Amino acid sequence: MKRRKVLEKKKSMEELMKEASAVKDQISLFPRFRCFDRNGLSVYLESGVGEKLSSCMKRYIQTLLKINMAGPYGAEWKIEEKVKRREMVAAEARYIFARDASIAKVNETSSTGGKEENCTLWMGDGDPVVGFVQYRFVLEEDVPVIYVYELQLEPRVQGKGLGIFLMQLIELIACQYHMSAVMLTVQKQNLNAMKFYISKLRYAISTTSPSKVGAEKNYEILCKAFDREAKAKLEAVFAGDQTIATALP
C-alpha cells in the first residue's frame, strides 16, 4: 500500500509538470508581467520553447552566455559551453525573452556617435532581445519544482530591476502550477549572482547542494521553497547559513 501511494503521488506530480509544460505562453496568465517599464528601461516579454528557437535566437543565447559566464567558469567554460548548447535546444526547455521596446534601430545609435553601452547584441528581426530566462519543470528529491537553468541579461540592462522582475514571474508561474519550489545553480566565483539570489531574493543554499553533502564543487544549488515538505527536503537550515549573505561583498 505504501509503495502504491508513493507511485500514485509521483504519477500525479508528473502529470502536473506535463500540464504546465504544455502551456505555450506562461506569461499570458500574468498580464501585469507582460511589460517592464522602470529605471529608464522599457521591455516586453515573450515566451519560447527550446526545440523551436530560431537560428538568430540560438546565436544570441550563445553569445550572451559567453559574455556573462566565461569569466565565472574559467577553464571549465569550453566544456560547459557544449553542455549549455545541448540544454538550450532541449524539448523541455522553456524561455522568457525580454525585448527592448525603446530601441527602434540599432544602427541609428552607432551612426550618430552614441555610446557603445546602448548597442545591442541582437542581430535578428524585431525589437532587440536584451536577456532571457531558461527554465524547466522537473522533480528534485521527489518534489515538483521549476529549475532555472539560466537568467542572463545584457550588461547594459543589469541593475535596473529586470532580473528581480523576471524571477518574481518565475515564482508566480511555479505557484500557479503547484510547483513546490524554485531552484537554480550558481557558480561560487559569480559573487554578484550569489548576492543577488541570497540577499535580494532570499534564496537559500539547498540541502542538495554539493557543499551540503560533502562534495567539493565550484557551484552551489540555491532554492526557495513554498511549502513545508519542500522546505524540509530542499531548504533545511544549517549552522552558518544565516551569515552567508553578509559575508558576500
Image (cartoon, rainbow, N blue to C red):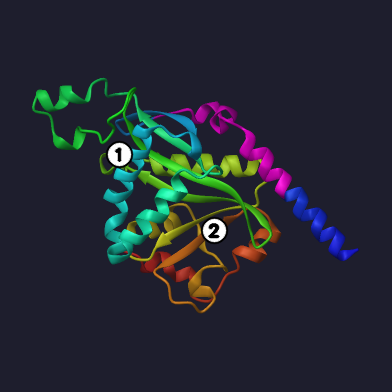
The percent position of residue 149, horizontal first and vertical second, equals 47, 51
Within 10 Å of disc 1 (Cα), the crowding (few <14, some 14-19, many 20+) is some
- The answer to which of 108 and 86 lies nearer the viewer is 86
Q: Residues within 10 Å of mark 2 (few under 14, many from 20)?
A: many
Task: Give the spatial CA distance, label 2 vs label 1.
Answer: 25 Å
Please report the residue visible at 49 percent of the width from the left and 63 percent of the height from the top.
221
Identify residue for label 1. Answer: 157
Quarter holding the N terminus is bottom right
The magenta segment: 14-36
Name the residue nearer the viewer: 198 or 65: 65
Q: Which mark is residue 173?
A: none
**Mark 2 lies on residue:** 223
Residue furthest toward the left? Answer: 113
Please report the residue visible at 35 percent of the width from the left and 65 percent of the height from the top. Answer: 248
Residue 201, position in %: x, y?
Answer: 47, 52
Label 1: element kind: helix
Quarter of the figure that contains the C terminus: bottom left
**Is 74 on the left or on the right of 221, as rendered?**
left
Q: Quadrant of residue 157?
A: top left
Based on the picture, tell me whether residue 164 belongs to the magenta stretch. no
> Is residue 136 visible in this depiction of the protein?
yes
Q: Residue 194, located in which quarter of the rendered image?
A: bottom left
**Which residue lies most toward the bottom here?**
214
Q: Does residue 224 sit above or below 214 in this rendering? A: above
Image x and y of residue 138, in percent: 61, 52
Q: Which amino acid lies under the numbered mark 2 shown in the image of this protein?
A: Cys
Name the spot of residue 106 as percent of width and height, x first: 21, 26
Q: Most prominent secondary structure in the magenta stretch?
A: helix
Residue at (10% x, 24% y) in the render = 111
